[in-house]
Image (cartoon, coloured by chain):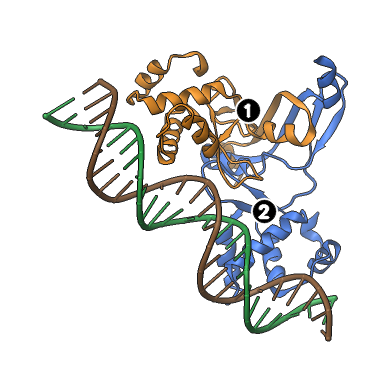
Chain colours: A blue, B orange, C green, D brown
Amino acid sequence: MLKYIDNKDIFKECGIKKTKQRNILLNILKEEEEPLTAEEIFIKARERDKYINLSTIYRTLNIFISKDIAIKLNLEKENKSMFQLNMMDHQHHIRCISCNKKIRIDKCPIIGYEYFIEENTNFHIIGHKLELYGYCSKCKDKKQ
Amino acid sequence: MLKYIDNKDIFKECGIKKTKQRNILLNILKEEEEPLTAEEIFIKARERDKYINLSTIYRTLNIFISKDIAIKLNLEKENKSMFQLNMMDHQHHIRCISCNKKIRIDKCPIIGYEYFIEENTNFHIIGHKLELYGYCSKCKDKKQ
DNA sequence: GTCCATGCAAAGGCTTTGCATTATA
DNA sequence: TATAATGCAAAGCCTTTGCATGGAC
């Protein structure tokens, strides 16, 4: 899991430079269980670097997302995005009900929604199972 | 299902006035299977009313959402919201793994995501099953 | 006739971008 | 030293809001 890998190695693996700002932001994401808005991240970052700029936050988060270090969530009630460390161990699949082909879905739509549901139901959510099903591209064509 | 209920009755039930603009917008949502951005709705609406304004679109959609006529989706890749007729027949539950209590989740996090997955996988999605589980508020407290 | 809805224009809020400066490899 | 990252300010885009006008009940 990303959380336990050294920042230096993560940056190296992604081919991006290690900077003080990126280090701070990655630490914040690692420390935080829940998704954060850019502004919340900004506030936390300012506690560690008095001069870090909001545009650096956004630029860095976008790089993290493109490198799959982080994921971006858009909760329904919010009109701002939330960001979270990419929990890479979490996987879902979509299954073809005709030929049984399976493909992996690499982004879980429920992360972030769990958080939203927790707020609304007062449940503490431990996990979920999601199964999507339909017709794969080949079987879809055959049907027509 | 909302789709087959007369607009006039929907407005009456919600206690809002029937206007030409609201009628047009509700028809657009009823006709469309897929979620639309405010701008897409605006363009379609302009074909039916040359003078309808974007702010009316947003205002009306927000009213529709507050009345549960429509739902708002925030897909991860987009930074704008998408809107869709509320398919009220679709339900999920969250289950307490301690006392087995179940509560209904009234908004499905997968609607809209199916659409996104279809684009990325070329599947034609027929449906999905989602099960969330955790500890309800009472059992959560007992544990502590 | 009253109150709510609309159009228009302007403002608000989140996010991105251009450019000069600074820091990394 | 060359290249990439940052800070700052400004712009961009989506969405909301104030206000006068128009329309529904």
Q: Nearer the viewer, residue B29 or A113?
A: B29
Residue at 57% x, 33% y: name it: B36
Q: Amino acid at mark 1?
A: Asn
Residue B104: which quarter of the image?
Answer: top right
Q: Which mark is residue B74?
A: none
Residue A38: which quarter of the image?
Answer: bottom right
**The C terminus of chain A: image quadrant:** top right
**The N terminus of chain A: image quadrant:** bottom right
Judge from the rendering whether residue A69 lies leftward or rightward of residue D25; answer left or right: right
Q: Nearer the viewer, residue A32 or B36?
A: B36
Residue at 79% x, 49% y: name it: A88
**Image spot of residue A87 (x, y percent):** 75, 50
Q: Amino acid at mark 2?
A: Gln
Asked if residue A12 can be seen in this view, the reply is yes
Determine the CA span between mark 1 and mark 2.
Answer: 30 Å
Chain hosting mark 1: B
**Residue named by callout 1:** B100
Q: Nearer the viewer, residue A12 or B47?
A: B47
What secondary structure is marked by label 2? strand
**Image spot of residue A47 (x, y percent):** 58, 72
Chain hosting mark 2: A
**Residue named by callout 2:** A84
Residue at 43% x, 14% y: name it: B6
Asked if residue A49 can be seen in this view, the reply is no
Q: Nearer the viewer, residue A97 or B29?
A: B29
Judge from the rendering whether residue A23 lies leftward or rightward of residue A99; answer left or right: left
Q: Residues within 10 Å of mark 1 (few under 14, many from 20)?
A: few
